[in-house]
Amino acid sequence: MNGEAIHNKRPELLMPASSLEVLKVAVIFGADAVYIGGDAFGLRAKAKNFSVEEMAEGIAFAHTRGVRVYVTANVLAHNDDLEKAAEYFAELRDMQPEHCDALIISDPGMFAVAKKVWPSAEIHISTQANNTNYETYRFWWELGAKRVVSARELSLAELKEIRERIPREMEIETFVHGAMCISYSGRCLLSNYFTGRDANRGACTHPCRWKYAVVEETRPGEYLPVYENERGTFLFNSKDLCMVEYLPELLDAGIDSFKVEGRMKTALYVASVARAYRKAIDDCLTGEEIYRRNLDWYRAEVSKCTNRRYTTGFFFGKPCEDAQIYDSSTYVNEYTYLGIVEEVREAEEMFPQQLSRKQTPCRLVRIEQRNKFSVGDAIEIMRSDGCDETAEVLAMYDENGGPLENCPHSKQVIWLELSKEARQFDLLRVRCDESG
């Protein structure tokens, strides 16, 4: 057994990715590892997810930059899932030119199938498996699991005890940021009960965010408000988890992987959170004094992406009433995502006739637009190194070089001339109060 917490080990920053684009953003903005879902057997059926071809491209992109990729297969399987799961694991095993670094599994049957089909696969046990004590960790270790994702209901003191009582080589992964489910370790029955869409099979409709009322059976259609402390009716609406201010405590507990929730989040969300935690982790390992000095920056950065306000969850004991949002289920959102710089080219190469009147050479950046903006707008170039710059949109062109005044059509491919230099994989965003 370990006997003492691991204090100095550099923890992994594990980020989610809903698409190939978001995977690349996670890698560029500081992730040590990325977890993704394929077209089957993950718990985010509504996410874009990855085709086999996209998965292969994403894994190659990540591995070239020293980043690991884990694939989720964490549904609670039924009989008719098992044969298809065997085929899926074989496909992942034989993926070329490289396969993923680990499988994330919650169901013992799926674990057994994976071990049979791909004996050498590294397997991580999902939080869905209700991993609340050190004997559960030992159980999975003896079966061949490398890592266990802790239940979100655990405190730091409990995690520290688990670290002390499991093999030193075994890894603990813990959620440190993102949405919290009103359920036990993510195992929720509300969605299936209300809509027939099973959260444990990847089809959650998020009923924890709905507004509820009471109906008396003899008075159909007469909705009576449900009050909690006279502040509102959102009964299950938890704040989001955020532990960026408590990294020394997480390190002291001996956690090996800091996991961020959000496999349905945008590239802007992933970039903002990855960059903030990357700097916070690196600063903390350099010196706690440096980390403390930069706390305001970390807080500001994670507040710039969509959130439901923040809580520390169960880490310091059972959450109190302040961990709940009673008046609304909407996000706080300071910035609007415009797109990611996919390519940078000399303007003369792209549209020589349209740009022949320009007196000085200029460069154009290519993006697939996510939200409307216009020529003349002040936007922000968000960079992985934290050196963001405000730039004016000087000109905008469609794919054929036709000039545009704005871009109203989502996912339209456009070329931009900006007043400041932008590089490939920079993100473009604008403050919500400045967007049109």
Image (tube, rainbow, N blue to C red):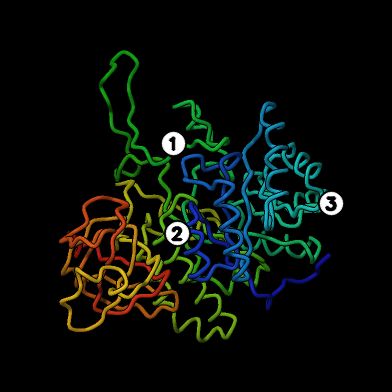
Could you tell whether 4 is left or right of 396 in the image? right
Could you tell whether 305 is left or right of 352 in the image? right
Instruction: Write down the residue under mark 2.
Output: 311
Q: Residue at x 47, y 62 (%)?
A: 242
CA distance separating discs 2 and 3: 35 Å
The answer to which image quadrant residue 89 occupies is top right
Instruction: Write down the residue under mark 1.
Output: 205
Q: Which of the numbered marks, if any, corresponds to residue 123? A: none
Q: Do the residues labelled 1 and 3 touch (CB within 8 Å)?
A: no
**Front of the two marks 2 and 3:** 3
Could you tell whether 142 is left or right of 357 in the image? right
> SS of the residue at dot 2?
strand
Q: Residue at x 40, y 65 (%)?
A: 342
Residue 426 drawn at (x, y percent): 39, 70
CA distance separating discs 2 and 1: 23 Å
Is 158 rendered above or below residue 291?
A: above
CA distance separating discs 1 and 3: 36 Å
Q: In which quarter of the image is the C terminus?
A: bottom left
Q: Which of the numbered marks, if any, corresponds to residue 142? A: 3
Task: Report the label total.
Answer: 3
